[in-house]
Image (spheres, helix red, strand yellow):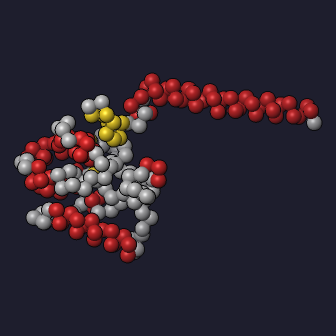
């Protein structure tokens, strides 16, 4: 029995040190050296203050800002500690009610816009934390934002174009617009506290 116990204990301690101490330390060190921005949350700073993350959405509902995808996280929208989708199927009446409410809000704040509303503006993302919208969703909101800010639509469209990222490596994913970065660009460094809620 003693002959069996010693190798088991040695193996347990060795694997604990390797997988519980050495491996996490090496991975953390590589992350901090090679990918420091990403390893620390892809945070966005403005005037020495963290205003958000590139990879976690935020709630924007003022007409002067671009709105992101709906978030189904609880108890608050975009709660990173509670990432989840709505889990509402296409035949669930609650999904239809959610979509109707969002369509009504979009139409209320932009009643002159008769364009079709892109689906990502009226449905929740799978994670509830999606920081991006499609270029079509951004284009739909240009007239509302331009009117609310007293800007020309062309000036707002130029900011949308600057905030649009293409496919990763030219072929993975779809083009996207980071809502926080776009709203910060609209503020031009001013009013960041108002933009980030």
- Residue 106 falls in image quadrant: bottom left
Q: Residue at x 73, y 29 (%)?
A: 14
User: Quick one: which residue is furthest to the right in this view?
Assistant: 1
Q: Position of residue 111 (x, y in %)?
A: 13, 66
Query: Which quadrant: the N terminus?
Result: top right
In the image shown, does 166 or 113 lie closer to the viewer?
A: 113
- On the image, the x and y values in percent for residue 76 come to 40, 56
Whether residue 164 appears in this view of the structure is: no
Could one spot residue 81 in this view of the protein? yes
Q: Is residue 87 above or below residue 7?
A: below
Is residue 12 found left or right of 111 in the rendered image?
Answer: right
Is 33 situated above or below 148? above
Left or right: where 4 falls relative to 166: right
- Residue 74: x percent and y percent? 43, 58
Name the side, left or right, on which 23 lies relative to 109. Answer: right
Residue 185 occupies quadrant: top left
- Residue 137 drawn at (x, y percent): 23, 55
């Amino acid at each position: 029995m003693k002959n069996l116990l010693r190798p088991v204990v040695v193996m347990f301690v060795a694997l604990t040190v390797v997988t519980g101490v050495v491996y996490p330390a090496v991975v953390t060190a590589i992350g901090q050296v090679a990918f420091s921005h990403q390893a620390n949350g892809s945070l966005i700073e403005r005037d020495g203050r963290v205003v958000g993350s590139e990879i976690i959405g935020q709630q924007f509902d003022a007409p002067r800002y671009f709105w992101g995808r709906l978030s189904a996280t609880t108890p608050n929208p975009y709660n990173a500690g509670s990432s989840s989708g709505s889990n509402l199927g296409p035949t669930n009446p609650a999904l239809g009610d959610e979509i109707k409410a969002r369509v009504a809000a979009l139409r209320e704040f932009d009643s002159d816009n008769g364009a079709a509303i892109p689906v990502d503006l009226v449905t929740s993302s799978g994670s509830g934390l999606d920081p991006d919208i499609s270029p079509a969703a951004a284009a739909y909101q240009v007239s509302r934002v331009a009117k609310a800010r007293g800007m020309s639509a062309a000036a707002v469209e130029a900011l949308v174009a600057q905030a649009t990222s293409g496919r990763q490596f030219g072929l993975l994913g779809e083009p996207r617009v980071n809502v926080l970065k776009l709203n910060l660009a609209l503020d031009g460094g001013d009013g960041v506290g108002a933009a980030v809620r």
